[in-house]
Image: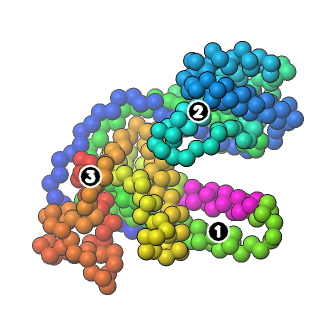
Amino acid sequence: MSEISYAGLFHGNTSLLETTIPNLLALKSVKQGYRPTSETLELLRLFRLMVNDCIDIGLASDTTAMKRLSILSYGKLKRYGGYSGYRLNAISKAAGILAARKKSIRRGYPTKTPALSKPLLVSSYGFKVEDGKLRFALKAGGFQLISLTPHTMRVLSEPNLRIRSFTLTQKSLSVCISKQAPEVECEGTVGVDRNLRNLTVGNEHCVIQHNLSKTVKIAETTTRIIGSFRRDDVKVRRRLASKYGRRRRYRTQHLLHNVTKQIVTQALTRREAIVLETIEGIRRLYRRGNGQGRSYRRRMNGWSFGEAQRQIEYKARWVGLPVIRLSRSETKGTSVVCPQCGERLQEDRRLRRKLWCGKCRTMTDRDVVAAINLSHVGG
């Protein structure tokens, strides 16, 4: 993955950000595969039934509150038997699903009757990690053991960690962990400009462009493969499309992981707060009827800008580094205003990504301009 560095482009006087962040609760999870036993699969099936029963009770009583739903549901879940802590987790899971549905209705989004479709188990009770294994309670008494991979054990062995919960599906185990992130005093800011083919990171001292063209190529290849299916069987086509969709998602996430890890590490070394712009709702620009071609709309709607932000935020929080999110009004014009003099930059049709400042007599990449301006606004 190539990088382009712009060092020492601008040397204007900027005020330093001196911020002391209190200890923050940082969360993340570590995921691995495993082979379920018949007892584990039965437990996942029963947990799914408990959650759906709680959802039905919540819909019938028109409640989404955890306490009210517990009063109405707990006694009825006793017929499933097993460990009592799983009933509380089933109620909590159902309350979250009902709250999400209520939020969608309030925002005017069409909703269906909610239900948990796949067997799973989410629990914060009745489990323990010891001797490289996860031990959790079964329905019919006793315990089940799952061997943890070396990577999982390496993550869980970090100091000052708390294991909060675990999630089991038919194929994977995910362990949620937390820690109190240390305080970080930042001495500056660094802007992150997200684009389809790159992530541009920097300030007036140094700017680095991380090339993400490979993610676009992965998306185009996946689309071409799925479009080549000719089997007259919807189920087969859907299964294959899901397979290649997962492959695309995993490869894209891996590329973004490497880039975002480097961004957070460099910002922590330089004691710089990370500044992000809010670009939610940008997909409305690429809807049918906006005068754009199908291939262009498909390419832009496959842009993983949210995944890049998610990874940066949770990794920064894990090391105690502040992330500043700017609103649309605060970032208006950041890609067309000169970071040195504030004049509006001119675009040359022959040099699509370059902008010219007539006052400073300089030509600069528009993504570099945006990253520097974001760092200024955030500071």
Front residue (pair 194, 288): 288
Q: Position of residue 158 (x, y in %)?
A: 56, 33
Q: Which mark is residue 222?
A: 1
- Residue at the farthest right position: 38
Stretch of the chain drawn in magenta: 238-255
Instruction: Determine the main secondary structure of the stretch shown in magenta.
Output: helix
Q: Is residue 275 above or below residue 52?
A: below
For mark 1, does the 10 Å Cα neighbourhood hold few (<14), some (14 to 19), or many (20 or more) residues?
some
Front residue (pair 265, 198): 198
Q: Which amino acid is tagged 3?
A: Ser
N-terminal label among 2 and 3: 2
Q: CA distance from mark 2 to mark 1?
A: 34 Å
Task: Tell me if 230 is positioned left or right of 291 in this view.
Answer: right
Q: Which mark is residue 170?
A: none
Q: Which amino acid is tagged 2?
A: Leu
At mark 1, the secondary structure is: helix
Tell me the colour scheme of the image: rainbow
Q: Which amino acid is tagged 1?
A: Thr
N-terminal label among 2 and 1: 2
Residue where numbered disc 2 is placed: 98
Residue where numbered disc 3 is placed: 329
